[in-house]
Image (tube, rainbow, N blue to C red):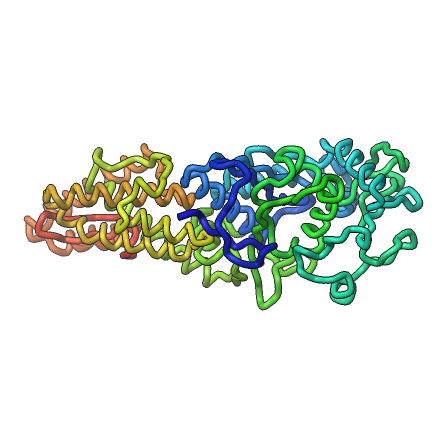
Amino acid sequence: MPVQIFDSMQRKNVALDPREPGRIGMYVCGPTVYNYIHIGNARTFLWFDLVRRYLTYRGFAVTYVMNYTDVDDKIIERAKLEGVTPEEITTKYAEAFEEDMAAIGVRPADILVRATDHVSDMVRAIEGLVARNLAYEAGGDVWYAVENFAGYGKLSNRTLDDMRAGERVEPHEGKRHPLDFALWKSAKEGEPAWESLWGPGRPGWHIECSVMSTKYLGMGFDIHGGGSDLIFPHHENEIAEAEGVEDGHFVRHWMHAGMVQMESEKMSKSLGNVALTKDVVASYPGQVARYWAIAGSYRSQVVFSDGALEDARLAYERLQTFVASARHVLGEDMPVPTPRVRDDDDLDPTGYVARFISAMDDDFNSAEALAVVHDLVRAGNKVLEAAQRGDAGARDELVQHAEDFLELMGVLGLTFEADEVSSELVGSLVEFLLELREQAREEKAFARADAIRDRLTELGVAVEDTPAGPRWRTGSASA
């Protein structure tokens, strides 16, 4: 079965229909690098990282393009506030963004582009819009004439009258229609500027994404993504620009991630109700934040709270405990994570991998996919003790469960790799303490034996006495 996605333009689930069989071109609107990103921003980028991972797993060759907006009013204001140049601001916050992404397991885009490297391309596109009577110059500024583009509003499914009534429109004496938007802004003293037919200035926000996406992926590329707050005006304006410059459909499929809320309001820097990603990962492991982000549908609106992160931590630790226990029992037989590609002919239809794929094929239903993973872990935990006793069949079953588990975790971008030296050292020390505990029990020094067990528990090592001997694992949660 083909992968199904919810197409924001068509407003329904449709089969993913790439322009070229087996290949996907995907563009996602990146950050404006003037400040640290909040966890709502991070969730959007994390989700499209997961989309890329999953499509690659399903056999597609994915080219992922993302941009940095590195010329913007907000950047200029931030530079003034910090007393540095705009370039220093964009460098600082681009590096901070990359650190945040690495902390939550988001891989860099295949092609990462900066607006300031493509101003000449934007100028040529604006010239083309002016030539086709879709844009006009007024006092050194250039505006897009929305009334002259017949398809304006088709993504947001609104008319010009609806948009005008529902949006805050900035007045400007040079605009012919209240919803006309800036393609080129004339230079102001002390601001970055480039030369153009209309005098020195800089591009507006929207033109950068329509120009850079088609430059690298071509007209009619497969997936354009971003947060749902970008549907209007940003993505609506991108369509008007791209399809105004060149006839044809700009994008085959639109995907939009839901917003994150805090205290019943959309998380927003302008509202001041944000949790910065760097602060979240300072309090919780990045993998826990990743688990929280993918625990529900990418299109859903989720609430950020310490309680939600604590739930994610407990769920992640159940997975972590299974890995640690399987490694302890299997030793050198423990499978290693190995990237692979899965197609429908390579599956046991009743197995956990097939169930996982069925869930993810349905518009990337990660909530159901994680439920499958936890079912797998429960089954794995049931054979752990028998495998530790030396039951060959149980051991083979545990190896298969561990192999499937690591495969699916690789798709989700969840990792459980400990430092090998530290892991071996901890394991050796725990085994030594358990030997001392067994010696104390043989000597009937039960108080000393209990003290050793209690101390291990305090250190996060759960000990279970079984007929085959003591079994230990890090953490105390069970799947």
Give the x, y percent position of residue 245: 75, 40
- Given residues 8 and 413, the one toward you in this image is 8
Compared with residue 207, is residue 269 higher up or lower down, i.e. above or below?
Answer: below
Residue drawn at (53%, 58%) of the image: 12
Compared with residue 97, is residue 332 higher up or lower down, i.e. above or below?
Answer: above
Can residue 374 be seen here? The reply is: yes
Q: Is residue 356 left or right of residue 74?
A: left
Q: Is residue 108 left or right of residue 467?
A: right
Residue drawn at (15%, 52%) of the image: 449
Q: How many marks?
A: 0
Q: Is residue 387 left or right of residue 138?
A: left
Which image quadrant: the C terminus?
Answer: bottom left
Residue drawn at (67%, 46%) of the image: 35
- Given residues 315 and 147, the one toward you in this image is 147
- Given residues 394 and 418, the one toward you in this image is 394
Can residue 81 be seen here? The reply is: no
Give the x, y percent position of residue 223: 57, 44
Give the x, y percent position of residue 264: 59, 68
Residue drawn at (56%, 41%) of the image: 26
Give the x, y percent position of residue 440: 11, 48
Q: Quadrant of residue 414?
A: top left
Q: Is residue 75 left or right of residue 451?
A: right
